[in-house]
Amino acid sequence: MRWVKVLLIVAIIAALSAFAGFRYWQSRLEAPIAIEESTIYEVPRGASFDQVMGDLDERGIIAEAWPFRLLVRVFPDELPALRAGEFMLEPGMSGRKVIGLLGSDNVVTYPLTIPEGWTFEQMRVLLAAAPKLQHSTAKMSDAEVMAALGHPGEHPEGRFFPDTYQYHKGISDLEILRQAYQRMEKTLAAVWAERDDGLVIDSAYEALILASLIERETGVDGERHRIAGVFERRLERGMRLQTDPTVIYGLGDDYDGNITRADLRRSTPYNTYVIPGLPPTPIAMPGRAALEAAVHPAEGDALYFVATGDGGHHFSSTLREHNAAVQRYILNRR
């Protein structure tokens, strides 16, 4: 019977050793990673689990790679597949949490803000300068960009919704453009569906054009609908809109920061001092507030407005009153 006792003791020692080994293994998995501040770690595309663990080991982020390599062999079905991308490691995270993070969708994202009233050209410059974005459109013309988005032949101006978009490393600038295009389509359709009855404009695209003029004329919330009302009444009466932002847009690179009398007389497709009605396309990317103003113009009798120099405008119902307001603004500016 002595040998039975010996076997029992050996079995107990083996079990205790196994348990101690298991506890030690688990303690290594739960040990905090060796970083003192938030650190971006990138999982390369196509990297294997062993390669990533080895890299974390070499960088000193984890103390040892073997506990994690053993984990993937013992419990292969319980671990998420690693995802390529950038991940934010935080001090105090355990190695096990790091593995969970590297297999999640919680990649590092970057904001890209497209301001209201910007042109498509400005948007393209912004995209070209965005870090860690894949610049697929760098060598494309505007027409080629629209074709790549599935909208060949469309003029790009005004078609993209100004907002803040999030992207992660490797995302194409085409994806940002696609999201912004779809946002504008959806927003414009919703706004147009709620439009006032009896508007002079008769299509959602004309609303987009008008909204771009409103956006470029004012950033003051309380004025958008009033300016829309002025434009609405001028269109009803067959008066030219005579809005300076269309002159500037029509001048393109020839605009030097000042509008001259010659510029006001210059014939371009966009100069609303020369052409009747709306310009052929939007002149900027309007936000939702400008879109809503375009389809809900304020009632009133004002037919003119002039900037007062403090961000607002003076509205007039007669040319005489308007000219007096213009003279006051000129004197104030001097």
Image (cartoon, helix red, strand yellow):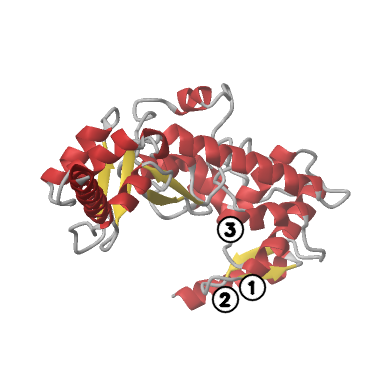
Quick one: SS at disc 2?
Answer: helix
Badge 2 vs badge 1, beta-carbon distance below 8 Å: yes
Residue 199 appearing in the image: yes
Question: Which numbered disc flags the more N-terminal residue, 3 or 1?
Answer: 3
Where disc 1 sits, the SS reads helix
Q: Nearer the viewer, mark 2 or mark 3?
A: 3
Amino acid type, residue under disc 2 in the picture: Arg
- Near mark 3 (Cα within 10 A), the count class, few <14, some 14-19 or many ≥20, is many
Distance, label 2 to label 1, CA atoms, is: 6 Å
Looking at the picture, does residue 196 appear above or below residue 69?
A: below
Q: Amino acid at mark 3?
A: Glu
- As rendered, which of 171 and 6 lies closer to the eye? 6
On the image, numbered disc 1 is attached to which residue? 324
Q: Nearer the viewer, residue 248 or 20?
A: 20
Q: Which mark is residue 217?
A: 3
Identified at 27% across, 34% down, the residue is 49
Q: Earlier in the sequence, mark 2 or mark 3?
A: 3
- Find disc 2 in the rendering and name its residue: 328
Above or below, comparing residue 226 to residue 105 in the picture: below
Tell me the quarter of the image containing the C terminus: bottom left
Residue sitting at x 57%, y 41%: 158
Real-space CA distance between mark 3 and mark 1, rounded to the nearest whole angstrom? 20 Å
